[in-house]
Amino acid sequence: MTDDIVASVVRQWQAVNPGLDTGPMEIIGRINRCAALLQQAEDAPLRAAGLTRAEFDLLGAVRRTDRELTPGELARETFSSGAAVTKRLRALQGRALVERRGDARDRRVAHVRLTDEGRALVDRLLPEQLAYERAVLAGLDEGARGELGSRLGELLVQLEGRLGGARR
């Protein structure tokens, strides 16, 4: 296997500081580089549908919970700020993908649901998006994908516990 960019950086650090423990850089640097490359590639099926990943995450949250959600619940489900959710909901409502209805008891609260068009879009795009993601990961065999998913899950649980951001 050819060296990746992180291996080159690690070699450079070891050359100028041989005693330096670069182990954390080898993991976190690779995670960050993978994330950057995945963001650069964007999500082709979503982009073709005129959606960002963040917008699709909102639509997906309403679809997978199969109930109306408040903007606050959507923020928690998608790890987004309230302001970002409000902005995205405005755009999605403008495209007739979501509807908001006021709460009968508290006028400050809105409930968000998918329109028929929004539900159909999510149901059409999710298999396409998963196929795209499968193609991105095609260089790893099934065992490697399982192991990587498991290890990243362990890391995520650990980080959420230590650094915050855990789901409530």
Image: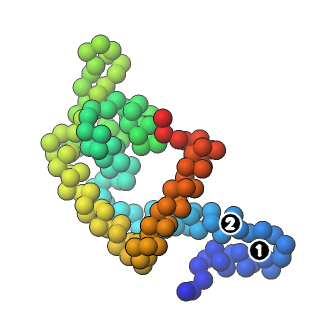
Percent x, y for residue 126? 26, 57
Disc 2 residue type (three-letter): Met
Is 149 left or right of 87, judged from the image as shown? Answer: right
In the rendered image of this protein, does residue 66 appear above or below residue 145? Answer: above
Look at the image and tell me whether residue 27 can be seen: yes
Choose top left, top right, bottom left or bottom right for residue 10: bottom right
Q: Which residue is mark 2?
A: 25
Q: Nearer the viewer, mark 2 or mark 1?
A: 2
| Residue 13: numbered disc | 1
Q: Nearer the viewer, residue 15 or 42?
A: 15
Q: Residue at x 18, y 39 (%)?
A: 115
| Residue 42: numbered disc | none
Percent x, y for residue 44? 32, 65
Is 143 left or right of 134, judged from the image as shown? Answer: right
* Marks 2 and 1, how far apart at CA: 10 Å
Q: Nearer the viewer, residue 22 or 153?
A: 153
Q: Secondary structure at mark 2?
A: helix
Choose top left, top right, bottom left or bottom right for residue 131: bottom left
Q: Residue at x 25, y 63 (%)?
A: 128
Disc 1 residue type (three-letter): Trp
Is 81 left or right of 29, judged from the image as shown? Answer: left
- Dots 2 and 1: beta carbons under 8 Å? yes
Quadrant for the N terminus, please. Answer: bottom right
Q: Which residue in the rendered view is the most extreme toward the bottom?
A: 1
**Disc 2 residue crowd, few under 14, some 14–19, many 20+, Cα 10 Å:** some
**Disc 1 residue crowd, few under 14, some 14–19, many 20+, Cα 10 Å:** some
- The earlier-in-sequence mark between 2 and 1 is 1
